[in-house]
Amino acid sequence: MTARESQPPSKWDRGAASQQGGRHEQQDRWGVFQSPDQEGLLAIVADGMGGHLDGALGAQTVIDVARAFAQNSLDALRANPPDALNRLCCRMHEAINRHSETARSTLVMVWLDRGQAHWLNIGDSRLYHFRRGRRLMRTRDHSAVQLLMDLGEIDESEMASHPAQNRLYRCLGGTEAPKPDTGHFSVQAGDLLALCSDGVWEYVTEPELWDAAIASGPAAAARTLARQAVERGGATADNATLILLRMDPDSAAGDAPRWLRRISAGFAALFNGRR
């Protein structure tokens, strides 16, 4: 079960997919929401925490609150993106608690607008940023294994298979106020962003995220990678959900002023006529 989504701006090639895996219920949710002026894009992955009976409710609440925010709070997102995302996170947390005492969810989201990406995460759903096949960043998990890695006791490659992988110390829902991490970075034509639940990053490598998106495009790659994740996870595979967003390699030219595009087109026509 996934969120309804609005069509993203043409400069972002998008794909999303979700697989239930071996779990009795799909507790992941995702959403991709376009701003009313068609320029901004809010992408979200939420993973209802499996140890709680209302995990699916928690994740769905995250998406429902985000949908309304994306449609009604463009001015706030434009004026101060970090503050707006933090307020959105708090609204999600409060809404979850209104619906249930036991619902919990992770959250990773990114607001894309005018060449900038502003992100927020809590829990162990991740955002990756790739450029020309190289990882520039990933969000930091709020988990026991992330702390072990930070202390140098395990390597990053061991995080996915460590016995304590699913032990989180931050989430949405519950008595404690959310304490998310936030940040921002610039995006360029050709960049790839991947948002995913732990059911994906446990079994899909970073090179596979990039290679699949480049080889077949984000839409086909998302379907393939989600299916691949649950196949590798076997009978007990977790829910697997991801969103892939690639900025159109030609979007830089499309964003140039009209007069500059016309001059460039004129020079191209003149050059071609002399060949």
Image: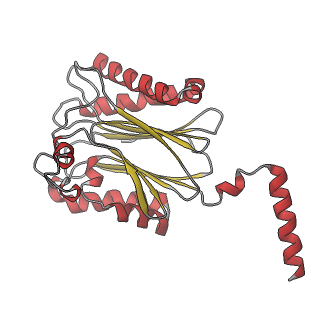
**Does residue 116 appear to the left or right of 199 in the view shown?**
right
Q: Quadrant of the C terminus?
A: bottom right
| 159 up-or-down from 35: above or below | below
| 274 up-or-down from 191: above or below | below
Query: How many marks on residues?
Result: 0
Q: Residue furthest top?
A: 98
Q: Residue at x 22, y 18 (%)?
A: 175
| 147 up-or-down from 226: above or below | above
Q: Nearer the viewer, residue 154 or 234?
A: 154
Q: Residue at x 23, y 55 (%)?
A: 156
**Does residue 271 appear to the left or right of 91 in the view shown?**
right
Residue 41: x and y in percent read 54, 40
**Does residue 270 appear to the left or right of 153 in the view shown?**
right
Please, which colouring scheme is shown? secondary structure
Residue 39: x and y in percent read 63, 39
Q: Nearer the viewer, residue 105 or 153?
A: 153
Q: Residue furthest left?
A: 163
Q: Residue furthest front?
A: 151
Q: Quadrant of the N terminus?
A: top left
**Does residue 164 appear to the left or right of 81 in the view shown?**
left
Q: Quadrant of residue 253?
A: bottom right
Residue 167: x and y in percent read 15, 39
Q: Nearer the viewer, residue 139 or 60?
A: 139
Q: Residue at x 59, y 34 (%)?
A: 35
Residue 272: x and y in percent read 84, 77
Q: Residue at x 42, y 26 (%)?
A: 86
Q: Quadrant of residue 30?
A: top left
